[in-house]
Amino acid sequence: MENQSATIKPEHQETDESSRENVPNNAAQTVSKKRRHSDNDCPAEEAVKPKKIFKYGNYNRYYGYRNKNESPMADVRLQAFISLKDKITGKQMLDIGCNNGSLTLLIAKHCHPTRTVGIDIDGDLIGSARRHQSNMLKSCTDDEDTFKVLKRVEFRTANYAYQDESLLASEKPQFDVILCLSVTKWIHLNFGDAAVKLTFKRAYRQLNEGGIFILEAQPWSSYKKKKKLTDAIFEQFKQIAFRPDEFNRYLLGDEIGFREMFELKIADHAVKGFRRPIYAFRK
Ligand SMILES: C[S@@+](CC[C@H](N)C(=O)[O-])C[C@H]1O[C@@H](n2cnc3c(N)ncnc32)[C@H](O)[C@@H]1O
């Protein structure tokens, strides 16, 4: 996927992937369009290159778009995670919806967790993440500690969103930090309210006592821009009753039970649409 040269307009693109853990089995989705071409009296129809639809927010050039083609180091969120280094070093970290792994690997490189797992619903992105990891490993052979940390990063294709509550029963605490950055909207639009709630419950169960869940949720206003991405998303959008501005209260409420919440200090993103607060919830 990473070699595709599609213009980055996340609002209008999507793809789909199926493989392994709980990943929906539907093929890459494209929208074919026919262009009318009439340079003579007899208009002809000519197929144009199908447009990819990134229905899970699985943009293959997300960081190029988000960081304006600068180095992933320019991601304003990285500094916020570096400031939490004491809560990450020597700990076990999960990144839900890690995309091509750029941010996951940088957090690992700078904060040295003992174990890092990045999962994404899109197997092509996970392939990119693994390639990215091996390139980083080649360039840090003289820094043994960082090399070991990066070598231990695991990337897996998986759909984190359960749709069956009974699956929660098998979840055991195993992480100290779980990141859920700009993913909830996509879980919401594809799998609905119940799946978002189960995502929060699953993360809570997977956290060790004292562990933190770090959430960057997209605002409701940004859902509206994507509601017509596919017919299924439109149907799901119409059913949504659990809005993002209720997430914090829900996470701290009886159904989940995080003990406290604090907001991460983060510099303003140059693009207004990416200025999203990031909250940490302690178990
Ligand atoms: C907008 S990107 C955010 C990437 C990264 N978390 C960040 O903020 O830099 C959303 C990512 O979540 C992934 N994703 C969406 N739904 C998912 C699900 N149910 N399970 C796992 N990954 C998912 C997408 O494939 C995509 O890579």
Image (cartoon, rainbow, N blue to C red):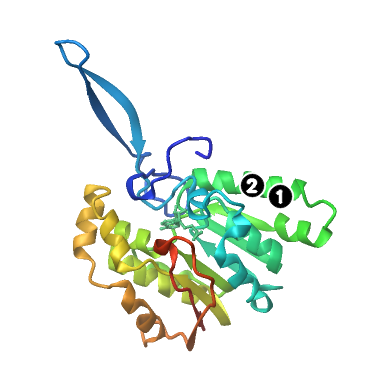
Q: Is residue 225 left or right of residue 96?
A: left
Answer above or below: position of 46 versus 3: above
Question: Could you tell me which residue is drawn at 64 percent across and 78 percent down?
Answer: 87
Q: Which label number is shown at residue 132?
A: 2
| Amino acid type for the residue under numbered disc 2 | His
Across and down, in percent, residue 206 comes to 52, 73
Q: Residue at x 50, y 69 (%)?
A: 268
Q: Is residue 140 above or below residue 268?
A: above
Relative to 162, 94 lies left or right: right
Residue 240: percent from left, percent from top: 23, 66
Q: Residues within 10 Å of mark 1 (few under 14, many from 20)?
A: some
Q: Quadrant of residue 45?
A: top left
Q: Hey, which quadrant is residue 39 in on the image? A: top left
Q: Secondary structure at mark 2?
A: helix
In the structure shown, which secondary structural element does the residue marked by tag 1 occupy?
helix
Q: Which residue is mark 1?
A: 136
- Residue at figure coordinates x 64%, y 57% from the top left: 105
Q: Amino acid at mark 1?
A: Met
Q: Is residue 43 visible?
A: yes
Query: Is 153 drawn above or below residue 206 in the view shown?
Result: above
Q: Are marks 2 and 1 in contact (CB under 8 Å)?
A: yes
Q: Nearer the viewer, residue 6 or 197?
A: 6
Q: CA distance from mark 2 to mark 1?
A: 6 Å
State ligand 1's quadrant. Answer: bottom left
